[in-house]
Image (cartoon, helix red, strand yellow):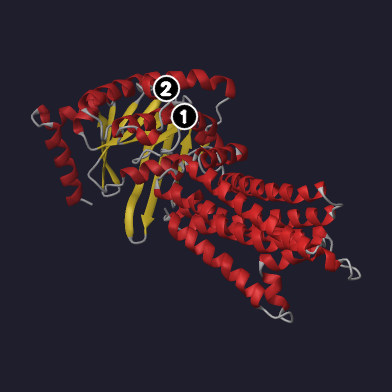
Amino acid sequence: MIRLIAWKELRGLFGAPSTWLILGALQFILAWAYLGRLDAFLQVQSQLALVANAPGASEAVVPGLFRDTLGVIVMLVTPLFTMRLLAEERRNQTLVLLLSAPISNARIVLGKFAGLIAFLWLLILWCGAMAATLRLGTPMDLGLLLSNTLGMLLLAASYAALGLYISSLTTQPVVAAVAALATLSGLWLIESSAPDGYRLWHALAPTGHFRNFNSGLLDSGDVAYFVLFCAFFLALTIRRLDDSRSYG
Amino acid sequence: MSEAPVTLAAHNLIRRFGPHRAVEGVSLQLRRGEVVGLLGHNGAGKSTTLQMLTGVLLPQSGRVEVCGFDLARQPEEAKACIGFLPETPPLYRDMRVDDYLIFAARLRLMPHEMIPDALAEAARRCGLQDVRRQIIGTLSKGYQQRVGIAQAIVHGPEVIILDEPTVGLDPAQIQDIRALIRELGTKHSVILSTHLLGEVESICDRVEIMHQGRMVYSDSSAGMKQYGNGHMTLEDVFLDITRGAVQTP
């Protein structure tokens, strides 16, 4: 049943022309950023050769591409896709179809979540594949690329869980989108503007836990954070659906 | 008729929204092969009652049993026996009719291999053969209503619950839908809410009248015609019953 709901979400997404337009535009931006970084690296490459222990091509391109370009893109587009998940079902009164069907609230929520992250992960894996084309010209630090990709997959999942919860709070998709965007960028701003000493702020925000992945470090603590973050907001969403059965 | 098994039973359902008492102690029983009409003014609690029967809304107290399964304890078994058309048809406007009905059937746990036949049957019954490939959002209101009915019957449920099924249809379509409900009523149990008295007269075996959240009258539709020694029209009977209920709350 989870798969049925997820499949329906995916079909709905790919059935809409706007999805393809957005995907195409994002791919263009990512390619632009990738080539820009590569170009910058090539220009300073001759000088880098004189420096001891200088960064290689992977290190010059991959972390920046994931953190500054893909990270921001995922933060901006996730609310656009999460907003419809439950808010629109409520507004069009189609949620009744799911609530009156033999399927538990947990499965409805997990299905919606699965459908959305499958879509977001596609975008991220695409970006990863593009970065892997570095291998065509130079030996590459694959570990760095893999840890960045894995970190971004987890980051996107946490954004999707938060967005899904916000979408369950309202009947207006636009309100859900704005609220999710405000929350995500608020978390990001807190994390990126906090001085190094304020460890709590770095520990709170998802982007703070992406930093280790970004520098090629796999920390099970960070993975646990993302898993807990998703579980927390998915549980809240399920609670919210339970409430809508109890209070109408 | 009375030997037919009970498919839906509700005991003493209560539902309040804040201080507003939407449903106060409603009990119902539905047998196989029976069509029951739930009648009442606007705001009498019909839709709330139907929502509680389908598990969309939890009753604050009381119990619902569907095909022998308790709706609160075994919700999945119970809900698999129900087909529900809410007041607003729950349609995904960007889906094709066929895809939507397949989704509805699979959501109600219908085995894969049975779906194509069930789909053709539901489309035939609701007169949707010509629009099966169309996007739901492009259909007229009447067709959308029929798609809504089709999703409620596609999985062949024991109990069919229809909230104002003929709203927005033209007279010819109303005739078709009434005939369909009669046909469904021979093998399944149907409960429908309406405020059209003619509908009750033409299709229902039994009438339940709700007023201000309570059941105030229950009889066979033939019995209702006998009310007032047959001198009153159904409108008068209905108004008389609900007016009487106001005076003795």
Q: CA distance from mark 1 to mark 2?
A: 9 Å
- Residue found 30% across the figure and 25% down from its top: B177
Q: Eyeballing the image, is B212 above or below A192?
A: above
Residue A88: percent from left, percent from top: 44, 49
The 10 Å Cα crowd at callout 1, few under 14, some 14 to 19, many 20 or more, is many
The chain under label 1 reads: B
Residue identified by numbered label 2: B122
A240 vs A189, left or right, is left
In the displayed structure, would residue B148 be above or below residue B128? below
Farthest residue toward the left? Answer: B231
Q: Residues within 10 Å of mark 2 (few under 14, many from 20)?
A: many
Residue placed at 87% from the left, 52% from the top? A139
Q: Chain of mark 2?
A: B
Q: Is residue B247 left or right of residue A71?
A: left
**Does residue B249 lie above or below B239 as drawn?**
below
Identify residue type, mark 1: Leu
| Discs 1 and 2 share one subunit | yes
**How far across and down, in percent of the image, does residue A7 sit?**
58, 38
Judge from the rendering whether residue A195 lies leftward or rightward of residue B249; answer left or right: right
Residue B159 appears in view: no
Q: Position of residue A175 (x, y in %)?
A: 44, 60
At horizontal 59% and vertical 47% (from top left) the residue drawn is A116
The front one of B227 and B181 is: B181
Q: Which residue position holds label 1?
A: B101
Residue A102 position within the rendered picture, expressed as x and y whole percent measured from the top left: 53, 37
Task: Tell me the amino acid under the disc marked 2.
Answer: Ala
SS for callout 1: helix
Cβ atoms at labels 1 and 2 below 8 Å apart: yes
Q: How many marks?
A: 2
